[in-house]
Image (tube, rainbow, N blue to C red):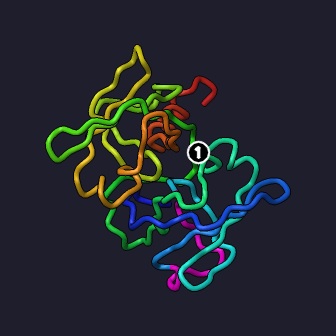
Amino acid sequence: MFTGIVECTGKLSESCAVEGGARYRIAVPFAEELHLGDSLAVNGCCLTVDEIGEGYACFDLLHQTLHVTALGSLSPGNLCNLERAMLPTTRLGGHFVSGHIDTTGTLRSISSVGQDHVLRVRVPDLRYVIDKGSITIDGVSLTIASIYREKKELEFWITPHTWQTTIMSQYAEGDRVNVEWDVLAKYAESFLRPEN
């Protein structure tokens, strides 16, 4: 479980195809604090650490992971958002994030308003979103500022701190991003299904 508060970014230094998926080597600033088997959110996707070296960690990505997330679009040199799993004593600064990507979206526009930036992301479905609700984009816990239902687009206002400390400053229009809906919304839908 994560909070959606990105700790730092790390660079994908190596990517190689393996049978049934891929293996990524990522420069991780806190690599010496990791242990084999730890969970690390990489652009919001929960991955398992399976090798640790000086300043880096390696991860095996299944074909399914590459298919349902935007991680397969990464190339060596790309930056990634990184967050370690939360502890029971962690302040929940964002919202409950499982690290299980639900879908991907497309970055439709980026604009600046004063010191802030405004992002518009097109998503395939809007049933889990509410005005001022929570959502995770590439592992970043964000508040939905506006919903444009006819276009299936969501608008987010990004503070200077978030812009500077995550991969968002590297975004370009048309980029594919990882999306995780609010887990509480998904539970609510499950409870209200007629078969329950």
Write down the residue under mark 1: 70
Residue at image location 29% in from the left, 55% down from the top: 162
**Residue 170 rendering spot, x and y as whole percentages:** 40, 50
Residue at image location 46% in from the left, 77% down from the top: 29
Instruction: Depth check: give the residue in front, 67 or 187.
Output: 67
**Residue 50 rendering spot, x and y as whole percentages:** 69, 74
**Residue 35 rendering spot, x and y as whole percentages:** 60, 81
Give the magenta part as a residue range: 31-42
Residue neighbourhood size for the residue with mark 1, other residues' Cα within 10 Å, grouped as few (<14), some (14–19), many (≥20):
many
Question: Image height check: is 155 above or below 69?
Answer: above
Q: In the picture, which quadrant includes the C terminus? A: top right
Query: Any magenta on residue 139?
Result: no
As shown in the figure, which amino acid type bears the numbered disc 1? Ala
Question: Image height check: is 126 above or below 145?
Answer: above
At mark 1, the secondary structure is loop
- Tell me which corner region of the image, top left, top right, bottom left or bottom right, holds residue 16: bottom right
Q: Residue furthest top?
A: 150
Question: Image height check: is 144 above or below 89?
Answer: above
**Residue 80 rendering spot, x and y as whole percentages:** 49, 59
Residue at image location 58% in from the left, 50% down from the top: 100
Q: Is residue 115 left or right of residue 12?
A: left
- Tell me which corner region of the image, top left, top right, bottom left or bottom right, holds residue 110: top left
Q: Residue furthest left?
A: 114
Q: Is residue 149 left or right of residue 190?
A: left
Q: Say how many tags the image has.
A: 1
Instruction: Depth check: give the residue in front, 57 or 3.
Output: 57
Residue at image location 82% in from the left, 53% down from the top: 20
Question: Image height check: is 144 above or below 31?
Answer: above
